[in-house]
Every structure is written in structure tokens, then in C-alpha cells.
Image (cartoon, rainbow, N blue to C red):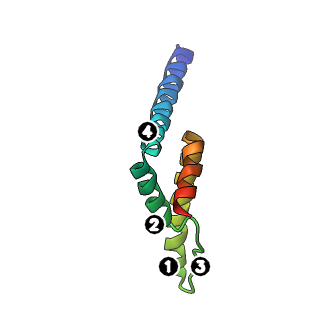
């Protein structure tokens, strides 16, 4: 009984994850979607130093960057080719 419930839960999680990845792929297919994701990555200090002399500002920047790194990994996993296209479009 528990195995069936665990399998069903795992299947729901897998389906939800596949939907997330599909959503990212659809966003990244569009130039406007890639531009938006680039802005999000920039807003999160993903590609720059987070250092600040003020501890509270440094902590805030670290939190932003953590989210940016998460988003960066999601984009790479879901849409690798479009991710690199986005980098080329913005460098």
C-alpha cells in the first residue's frame, strides 16, 4: 500500500518537474523570453561580485546571487542551446 502511494507521489513530482522544464524551454525559445531571463540573472548579481563592506548588504547580495545561480542552473538544464544563445545575444 505504501509503495503505491510513494510511486504515485514520485510520479506526480516527476510530472511537475517535466512541466517546469517545458515552461522554461518555451520561454527560452523566444528572443523576448531570453531577454527577460537575462535581466533576471543580471538583477540577481549572477555574473558580478557580491562583495560589500557592509555585512547586511553583503548578506542581501549573497541571497540575490543564490537565487540567480539557481535560475542559471534551471535555464542550463532545461534549454542548454537557448541558454548559450542568450549569452551570445547579451555579451
Residue that carries the numbered disc 2 in the rendered image:
43
Instruction: Report the Cα–Cα distance between label 1 and label 3.
Output: 8 Å
Q: Secondary structure at mark 1?
A: helix
Question: Furthest residue to the bottom?
Answer: 53
Q: Nearer the viewer, mark 4 or mark 3?
A: 4
* Label 1 to label 2: alpha-carbon separation: 15 Å
Task: Tell me which numbered mark, 4 or 2, is placed earlier along the sequence.
Answer: 4
Disc 1 to disc 4, C-alpha distance? 35 Å
Question: Considering depth in this image, is 9 or 36 the residue closer to the camera?
Answer: 36
* Residue highlighted by disc 4: 26
31 with respect to 49 (left or right): left
Residue 77 shows up from this direction:
yes
Which of discs 1 and 4 lies nearer the camera? The answer is: 4
Mark 3, other Cα within 10 Å: few <14 / some 14–19 / many ≥20 = few
Q: CA distance from mark 4 to mark 3?
A: 34 Å
Percent across and percent down for residue 58 are: 54, 77
Residue mark closest to the camera, 3 vs 2 = 2
Q: CA distance from mark 4 to mark 2?
A: 22 Å
Q: Earlier in the sequence, mark 3 or mark 2?
A: 2
Q: Which residue is mark 1?
A: 57
Classify 10 Å Cα crowding around label 1: few (below 14), some (14-19), many (20 and above).
Answer: few
SS state under label 3: loop
Q: Residue at x 41, y 56 (%)?
A: 36
**Of labels 1 and 2, the one closer to you:** 2
- C-alpha gap between disc 3 and disc 2: 15 Å
Camera-side residue of 16 and 88: 88
The numbered mark, 1 or 3, whose residue comes first in the sequence reads 3
Q: Going 47% across and 26% down the picture, which residue do you hit?
A: 12
Q: Position of residue 68 (x, y in %)?
A: 52, 59
Q: Is residue 5 above or below residue 84?
A: above
Say which label, 1 or 2, has the lower sequence index: 2
User: What residue is disc 3 on?
Assistant: 51
Amino acid at each position: 500500500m505504501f509503495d503505491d502511494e510513494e510511486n504515485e507521489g514520485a510520479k506526480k513530482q516527476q510530472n511537475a518537474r517535466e512541466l517546469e522544464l517545458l515552461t522554461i524551454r518555451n520561454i527560452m525559445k523566444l528572443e523576448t523570453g531570453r531577454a527577460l531571463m537575462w535581466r533576471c540573472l543580471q538583477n540577481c548579481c549572477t555574473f558580478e561580485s557580491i562583495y560589500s563592506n557592509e555585512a547586511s548588504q553583503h548578506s542581501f547580495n549573497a541571497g540575490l546571487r543564490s537565487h540567480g545561480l539557481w535560475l542559471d542552473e534551471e535555464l542550463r538544464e532545461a534549454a542548454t542551446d537557448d541558454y548559450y544563445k542568450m549569452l551570445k545575444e547579451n555579451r
